[in-house]
Image (spheres, rainbow, N blue to C red):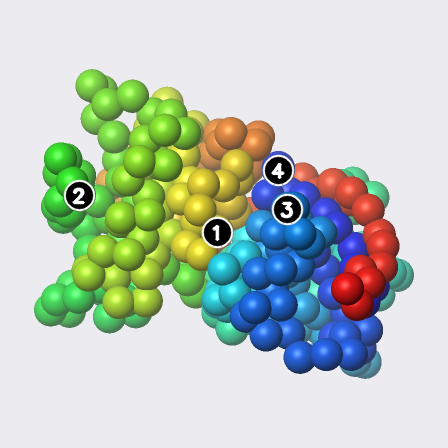
Amino acid sequence: MKFAKYHGLGNDYLVINQQDLSFKLTSEKIKLICHRNFGIGSDGILLGSFDDGLFSVRIFNPDGSEAEKSGNGLRIFSRYLWDRGLVGDKSFSIQTLGGLVNALVLDRGHTIQVEMGKVSFWGEYITVVGIGREVINEEIEISDKIFNFCAATIGNPHCVINLDEVDEISPQIAQKYGYKIENHPLFPNRTNVQFMKVINRNCIHIEIWERGAGYTLASGSSSCAAASVAYKLGFCDSNITVSMAGGLMNIQVSPDFSILMTGEVTKVAEGIMFWE
């Protein structure tokens, strides 16, 4: 099986052409391929197909589950298409389980801009248990702590927790509470989790626990969700730099909560995985 490996701010994916795949990509095989000791190692797999300029991608988490959308995954897949000469300097579309997105390759492939669609805060779209409502400033109790959170979707579910002045933001807080929030009964389809600290009107910092992947250095869809919440709550203006452990992402939030995401992509390797 041929593969290419890329990372977006430390969030790494393997890209596989559907035509190069001679076996069924089962949950167990995904876990093995993504394993950093027994496989190639990655935060997920992007299974792409492209015929006559029609591009689509399926996104798999390292636990074998399938994600609806991934901002870093979409930027990486866009760079892969550019590297193969399938796209140029004009905008193109990619179909995902979470909807159709438009992408644009800049800076000779090193920077990718993606129109991620509209963010919604409505519980029935996310999915969040309870009556139909925008899930804004609600409480969730985890172990020894009660957090204030907002829920959002941009094709995949997010739980954004705004930390107050006395809370320290660090990888440890995501690692301590992330799994329990991901699997909380409030979220029947599980959820991605962002712990957010507002720096100023144009900058936030987030620590990320990704559904099906765990603690993650960077995430495009997490950046979109957190920036949208910061804008929704009036903490930030519409042009927001999202700081993460892996680096910086730019998110522009329109008044209707349409999102334009811009960030870097790095090519790591190409190779062949053997049948063993």
Mark 3 — residue?
36
| Residue hosting label 4 | 10
- Residue 105 is at least partly visible in this image: no
**Foreground mark, 2 or 4?**
2
Question: Disc 4 residue type?
Answer: Gly
Going by the numbered disc 2, the residue's amino acid type is Ile
Which amino acid type is shown beneath numbered disc 1?
Ala
Q: Residue furthest right?
A: 85
Residue furthest front in the image? 276
CB within 8 Å, label 2 to label 3 = no
Q: CA distance from mark 2 to mark 3?
A: 30 Å
* Picture layout, residue 275 above or below residue 244: below
256 vs 247, left or right, is left
Label 3 packing within 10 angstroms: few (<14), some (14-19), many (20+): few
Query: Local crowd at mark 2 within 10 Å, few (<14), some, or many (≥20)?
Result: some
Tell me the residue that label 1 is attached to. 213
Residue 160 sits above or below residue 273 on the image: above
- Residue 273 visible within the image: yes
Q: Looking at the rendered structure, which numbered label has been put on residue 142?
A: 2
Q: Quadrant of the C terminus?
A: bottom right
Q: Which residue shows up at 66% across the image and 79% down it?
A: 24
